[in-house]
Image (cartoon, grey):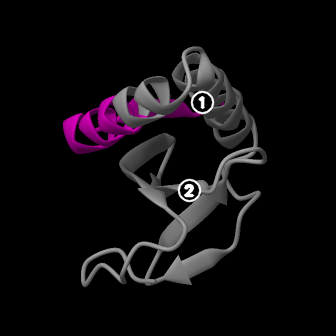
Amino acid sequence: MSYTLNVQPEAEEDAALIFDELEEMTPGLGQRFLDALDDLYGYIEQFPFGFQKRYKDYRHGYLRRFPYRVVYLVEGDAIYVYQVRHTRRIEDPEFGP
């Protein structure tokens, strides 16, 4: 089955803010983050059930080289990415720990 990845505007905004912070710390680091995020999106699109459910039906996919995760939901043949967040961020009432 083929899945379609849909990154919600909130997740795009999260990624843009993280990019800006990382670029400010070290030029080029933000781009490496975006490359890692793209790799994770590709993995999630290919293997949407590759990460276990964390809260309700939301799954959390983790970046390997950065302390960030992607919160997503699989519905039918669609994957919805709702959030990109730091792994130490306080629990979100909608998406869980």
Q: Which of marks 1 and 2 is nearer the N terminus?
A: 1
Amino acid on which disc 1 is placed? Phe
Name the residue beneath numbered marker 1.
33
Q: Does the magenta stretch include residue 6?
A: yes
> Which percent across, then down, holds residue 81?
41, 46
C-alpha gap between disc 1 and disc 2: 11 Å
Residue 1 visible at all: no
Q: Is residue 8 magenta?
A: yes
Left or right, 55 with respect to 49, comes to: left
> Which percent across, then down, holds residue 85?
43, 57
Residue ID at (55%, 67%): 87
Left or right, 45 with respect to 10, comes to: right
20 over 8 or under it: above or below: above
In which quadrant of the rendered image does the N terminus lie? top right
Residue ID at (55%, 66%): 59
Toward the front, the furthest residue is 25
Q: Is mark 2 on a helix, strand or loop?
A: strand
Q: Which of 90 and 72 is in front in this view?
A: 90
Residue ID at (56%, 25%): 26
Name the residue beneath numbered marker 2.
69
- Residue segment shown in magenta: 2-18
Q: What element carries label 1?
A: helix
